[in-house]
Amino acid sequence: MSQPAVRTRSLVKEFEKGRRTIWQRLRREPDRRERFRAVDGIDLEVEPGEIFGVLGPNGAGKTTTLKMLSTLLEPTSEQARGLVLAGL
């Protein structure tokens, strides 16, 4: 059995809603932004030579997932650091 080309376990990405203003930063106010999960626990395994697609409604996290797989975006979850991109 060969090594998977892509493997993720419990892939998670969280973002903060809104922005901190310059006045909040200057006053050293605590960051009160709400966090939300764009991707919540994806398990994915793709074998070398296999073709796969990502389907879902708008806002489901498809682009965020692909950005994490291509290393353009860092995952929030520590477990996702086991991401393997081999043989590509």
Image (cartoon, rainbow, N blue to C red):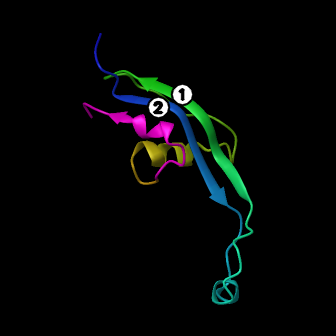
**Residue 87 sits inside the magenta stretch:** yes
Provide the secondary structure element on which disc 2 rests. strand
Where is residue 17 drawn, in percent x and y? 71, 64
Residues at discs 1 and 2 in contact (Cβ within 8 Å): yes
Label 2 neighbour load within 10 Å: few <14, some 14-19, many 20+: many
Q: Nearer the viewer, residue 2 or 48?
A: 2
Where is residue 45 drawn, in percent x and y? 45, 24
Q: Earlier in the sequence, mark 1 or mark 2?
A: 2
The residue lying at 69 percent from left, 46 percent from top is 58
Indicate left or right for 23 with 47 as reference.
Answer: right
Please, is residue 85 above or below residue 33 in the view? above
The overriding secondary structure of the stretch rendered in magenta is loop
The residue lying at 71 percent from left, 69 percent from top is 18
The residue pinned by badge 1 equals 43
Provide the secondary structure element on which disc 1 rests. strand
Q: Residue furthest left?
A: 87
The amino acid type found where label 1 is placed reads Asp
The residue stretch that appears in magenta: 74-88
Give the quarter of the image for residue 82. top left
The residue pinned by badge 2 equals 8
Which quadrant is the C terminus positioned in? Answer: top left
Which quadrant is the N terminus positioned in? Answer: top left
